Amino acid sequence: MKETVVSGIRSTGKLHIGNYYGAVKSFIQMQHEYNCYFFIADLHSLTTHPTPADLHGNIKQVLVEYLACGIDPEVSTIYLQSDVPEIAELYLYLNMNAYKGELERSTSFKDKVRANPDNVNAGLLTYPVLMAADILIHKATKVPVGKDQEQHLEMARTFGNRFNRLYNQEYFPEPYAFTYAKGLVKVPGLDGKGKMGKSEGEGNAVYLSDTPEVIRKKVSKAVTDGGPTAPNQEKPEAIQNLFELMRIVSSADTLDHFEAQYNAMAIRYGDFKKQLAEDMILTTAPFRERINEIASDTDYLRKVARYGAEKARESASKTIKEVRELIGFRSF
Ligand code: ADP
Ligand code: TRP
């Protein structure tokens, strides 16, 4: 039997190349090897109170981009989280054994509280419980995600194991973060300060749907410095980040060339950024063309979502039936 894979992306807008290299690229590779469930985490995105129109538009955007990247709805199960009510039910059960203290200690919760102190809602606190429900509902063991999700996976294992202990059953298997790369991926942003992300400010992220002109402009504005002042010197974070981006999108020869130039103090950041922008344009070109094509085919999108919901619910309802039985909700 093939191992089961689950992963999702919140419907908060367009996908950036961090989402692609951290998660979606593995989805495409994994779908032929594993039993895969890829979803759009639209319930998770409610923590920030989107308007109905924005929510709907963002869900569509992620669905379109999943398909444009090459997730095949005939091979993988693609669905909206909100189309599978069994997930919300499992979330409720898992919440009974998720404790305030451990939820408050989660790094992503603390980051969100710092960023938005006026919107510390219960959905935000229990975000990792809903994520655990997403994964456990299909009894998945492999979860392709970027490095920032590692702690959430650990929490999913904790909640699954706690349920198993409480009901004295080896019911849920342990899910682990998965990547084909050497370690979990963290794609840096263009602002010189850490990861690429949607909420990190304008210009930090390069989106799969960005036009070549937009990509050139964003990369040309990326943070640099006055250049190396000694041969072979260690790179400051902003420069290291741009080299890391080049390692991801460019050929090894190109990367070696600019590394050598940096080490020889001969690098011209203008040329370096031009090359980086052109390689980003090349790697995203195939997606860009398909995004527009798929977005206009509403009939197809409707069919994909309906078919995916049906397949996801088949698996989810089987789990919920067993979970209810274990908890003690039994018929007379
Ligand atoms: P964002 O951080 O932009 O809001 P999400 O939180 O929705 O994006 O992330 C969806 C998936 O993309 C997760 O698996 C996450 O680990 C991955 N991801 C997001 N940003 C990066 C990044 N900069 N590098 C690697 N993976 C990332
Ligand atoms: N928490 C993930 C993120 O912010 C998205 C997500 C929700 C997820 N549920 C999941 C990822 C289940 C993998 C598996 O990126």
Image (tube, rainbow, N blue to C red):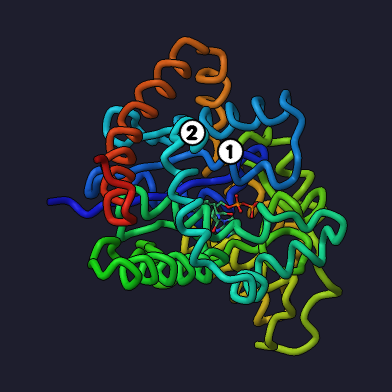
Lower sequence index among marks 2 and 1: 1
Image quadrant in which the C terminus is located: top left
Alpha carbon separation for disc pair 2 and 1: 7 Å
Ligand 1 in which quarter: bottom right
| Residue closer to the observer: 131 or 178 | 131
Rendered residue at 66%/66% (across/down): 108
Mark 1: which amino acid?
A: Asp
Position above or below: 312 against 110: above
Label of residue 80 in the image: 2
Q: Would you say residue 314 is visible in this rendering?
A: yes
| Residue closer to the observer: 310 or 57 | 310
Label of residue 144 in the image: none
x, y (%) of residue 232? 65, 88
Determine which quarter of the picture holds residue 194: bottom right
x, y (%) of residue 274? 70, 51
Structural crowding at the residue carrying mark 2, measured as other residues with C-alpha within 10 Å and reported as few (<14), some (14–19) or many (≥20): many
Task: In the displayed orientation, state which residue is furthest to the front.
Answer: 332
Task: In the displayed orientation, state which residue is furthest to the left.
Answer: 1
